[in-house]
Image (cartoon, rainbow, N blue to C red):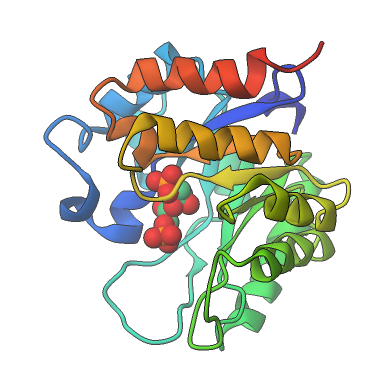
């Protein structure tokens, strides 16, 4: 994970929502353009940018480390969530990826398929010297509350035991309960997922500060940056909280 760290911490820019949610849900005339996101990633000093392979093929310019998401789904099918592999590790490497990402819906009746696929991907990534980052999102009829202390810690632990090099998990809402998830992750770095845009910057920054206080390595955030009227100002605030506050 060293490629993605500054002072042992990291702020990653996520931009795979076009497939996950559809453009009308999240995008404006400005942020629907992947070139705008690439520019934000570089000018904002992000430690990495997360793209699906189609965006990486057409827009990745090599100016910020790349993480290619290897699986994906749309928001259209209802029922138990399953996200299958759509890009190989080898192809991600050919696009310039320095890490690969994969979403596991913990608790879905299809979780075993995602466990198995991630297991293969993790081994293939390690053979090529790349970290495999797991997005672990508890979801499906078996999950009552996807941000409870217990379920977020379960997500972190599942990632550790499945061999992830880092896990991206949802914030529980407070630092103390999130610290249980960080503890459950052992030596594996934990990244806080951004989530829908917070009502104001202060609310989001308080969550970020809480996650860092709890021991998170950083965050992988999308909407709270590129839906902000001033994405570079938000990037600066995030770097200051996550990276520049870190003791050398
Ligand atoms: P955001 O910061 O915009 O929430 O991005 C993080 C992310 O994990 C994306 O990588 C992914 O597309 C999206 O959230 C998934 O969101 P959802 O919780 O709706 O599945």
Q: Quadrant of the N terminus?
A: top right
- In the image shown, does 15 or 216 lie closer to the viewer? 216
Vertical placement of residue 70 versus 50, above or below: below
- In the image shown, does 237 or 31 lie closer to the viewer? 237
Residue at image location 27% in from the left, 24% down from the top: 36
- Determine the residue located farthest toward the left in the rendered image: 29
Q: Quadrant of the C terminus?
A: top right
Image position of 36 (left or right of 135):
left
Residue at image location 83% in from the left, 65% down from the top: 161
Residue at image location 60% in from the left, 32% down from the top: 209
Residue at image location 72% in from the left, 63% down from the top: 153
Query: Is there any visible trace of residue 69 in the rendered image?
Result: yes
Query: Is there any visible trace of residue 164 in the rendered image?
Result: no
Q: Quadrant of residue 123?
A: bottom right
- Determine the residue located farthest toward the right in the rendered image: 187
Image position of 39 (left or right of 163):
left
Residue 214, percent from left and from top: 73, 41
Residue 183, percent from left and from top: 84, 52
Q: Quadrant of residue 230?
A: top left
Residue 79, percent from left and from top: 38, 87
């Amino acid at each position: 994970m060293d490629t993605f760290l500054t002072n042992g911490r990291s702020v990653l820019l996520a931009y795979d929502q076009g497939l996950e949610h559809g453009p009308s849900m999240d995008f404006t005339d400005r942020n629907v353009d992947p070139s705008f996101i690439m520019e934000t990633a570089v000018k904002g000093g992000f430690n990495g940018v997360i793209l699906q392979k189609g965006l990486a093929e057409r827009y990745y310019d090599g100016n910020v480390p790349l993480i290619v998401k290897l699986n994906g789904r749309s928001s259209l099918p209802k029922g138990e969530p399953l996200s299958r592999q759509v890009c190989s590790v080898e192809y991600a490497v050919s696009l310039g990826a320095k890490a690969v990402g994969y979403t596991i819906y913990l608790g879905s009746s299809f979780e075993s398929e995602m466990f198995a696929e991630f297991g293969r991907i993790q081994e293939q990534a390690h053979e090529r010297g790349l970290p495999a980052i797991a997005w672990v999102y508890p979801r499906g009829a078996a999950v009552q509350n996807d941000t409870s202390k217990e379920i977020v810690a379960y997500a972190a632990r599942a990632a550790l035991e499945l061999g992830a090099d880092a896990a991206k998990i949802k914030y529980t809402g407070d630092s103390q309960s999130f610290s249980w998830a960080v503890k459950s992750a052992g030596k594996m770095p934990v990244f806080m997922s951004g989530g829908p845009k917070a009502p104001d910057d202060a609310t989001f920054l308080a969550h970020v500060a809480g996650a860092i206080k709890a021991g998170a390595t950083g965050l992988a955030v999308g909407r709270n940056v590129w839906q902000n009227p001033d994405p570079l100002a938000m990037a600066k605030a995030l770097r200051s909280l996550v990276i520049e506050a870190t003791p050398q």
